[in-house]
Image (cartoon, coloured by chain):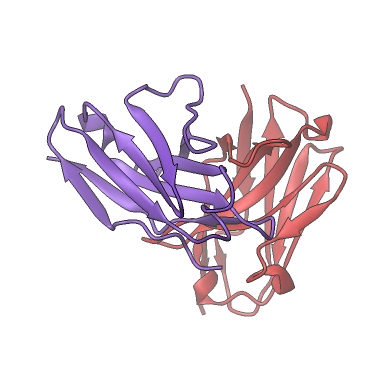
């Protein structure tokens, strides 16, 4: 059974760089048949797609966040990561990692999510 | 890209049927049959309920069905049950190879 688990700082200060990691178990991130992505949800609001990456490192991003976001993959650890620079209170959200099939356009598996709060 | 528009809330009595709409544009819903729907209970991760407009993943009840007309997609829930009370989110692939989600709909079982 595939499982995704996010890990991150929890609490951050404005202007810092957010770093989150998603650890994948029950499946290989190197299979090449899936995209691995990040989606966030501010408290009480809807979901927002951040970006996705293939095991090869080919990534694409939400244009509204692209200037501040980098997604990378570490196949040796079966993990992929999100870095988001210059965070503000508006970046406070639950961050989810998720998987979609290469030929699919939907998110089949989700992690449980991790809350990141940006506050001075 | 603006969020897809959903009603803030929809309610129904047990056993009834309800429909949730999701309105986008010709650059997302209107251009592809790549609409998906997710159910989210409080404090939990979203769960895929419908993909490619009207397909159900294995294990999802056939009480859930999806459709699309023009720039608007819809999720129907028949035989409403207490366990269906949750937030529902639509999502569409877009013409610039990105994904846009809806504003979310709270379903209440009366």
Q: Residue at image x 47%, y 33%? A: B54
Note whether residue B46 is visible.
no
Quadrant of the image containing the N terminus of chain B = bottom right
Q: Choose between A92 and B58: the one closer to the eye.
A: B58
* Relative height, residue A89 to residue B92 (above, below): below
Q: Choose between B91 and B29: the one closer to the eye.
A: B29
x and y, in percent, of residue A110 in the image: 56, 39
Instruction: Name the quadrant containing residue A78.
Output: top right
x and y, in percent, of residue A120 in the image: 51, 80
Note whether residue A26 is visible.
yes
Q: How many marks?
A: 0
Side of B27 relative to B75 (left or right): right
* Relative height, residue B9 to residue A74 (above, below): below
Q: Choose between B57 and A14: the one closer to the eye.
A: B57
Q: Residue at image x 37%, y 44%? A: B74
Q: Residue at image x 38%, y 31%? A: B65
Side of A61 relative to B37 (left or right): right
Instruction: Name the quadrant containing residue B81.
Output: top left
Which chain is rendered purple in the image?
B
Quadrant of the image containing the C terminus of chain B = top left
Which chain is rendered red in the image?
A
Q: Residue at image x 28%, y 58%? A: B8
Side of B28 relative to B10 (left or right): right
x and y, in percent, of residue B33 in the image: 56, 42
Q: Choose between B67 and A28: the one closer to the eye.
A: B67
* Relative height, residue A64 to residue B9 (above, below): below
């Amino acid at each position: 059974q595939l499982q995704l688990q996010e890990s991150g700082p929890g609490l951050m200060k404005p202007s810092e760089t957010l770093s989150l990691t998603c650890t994948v178990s029950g499946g290989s991130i190197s299979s090449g048949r899936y995209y691995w992505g990040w989606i966030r949800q501010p408290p009480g609001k809807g979901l927002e797609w951040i970006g996705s990456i293939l095991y090869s490192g080919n990534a694409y991003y939400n244009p509204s966040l692209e200037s501040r976001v980098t997604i990378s993959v570490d196949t040796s650890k079966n993990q992929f990561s999100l870095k988001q620079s210059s965070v503000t209170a508006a970046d406070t959200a639950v961050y989810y990692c998720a998987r979609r099939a290469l030929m699919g356009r939907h998110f089949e598996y989700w992690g449980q999510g991790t809350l990141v709060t940006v506050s001075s | 890209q603006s969020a897809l528009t959903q009603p803030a809330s929809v309610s129904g009595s047990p056993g009834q049927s309800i429909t949730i709409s999701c309105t986008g544009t010709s650059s997302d819903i209107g251009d592809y049959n790549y609409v998906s729907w997710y159910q989210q209970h409080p404090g939990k991760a979203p769960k895929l309920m419908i993909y490619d407009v009207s397909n159900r993943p294995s294990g999802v009840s056939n009480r859930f069905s999806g459709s699309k007309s023009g720039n608007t997609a819809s999720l129907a829930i028949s035989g409403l049950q207490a366990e269906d009370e949750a937030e529902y989110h639509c999502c569409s692939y877009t013409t610039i190879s990105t994904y846009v989600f809806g504003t979310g709909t709270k379903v209440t079982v009366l």
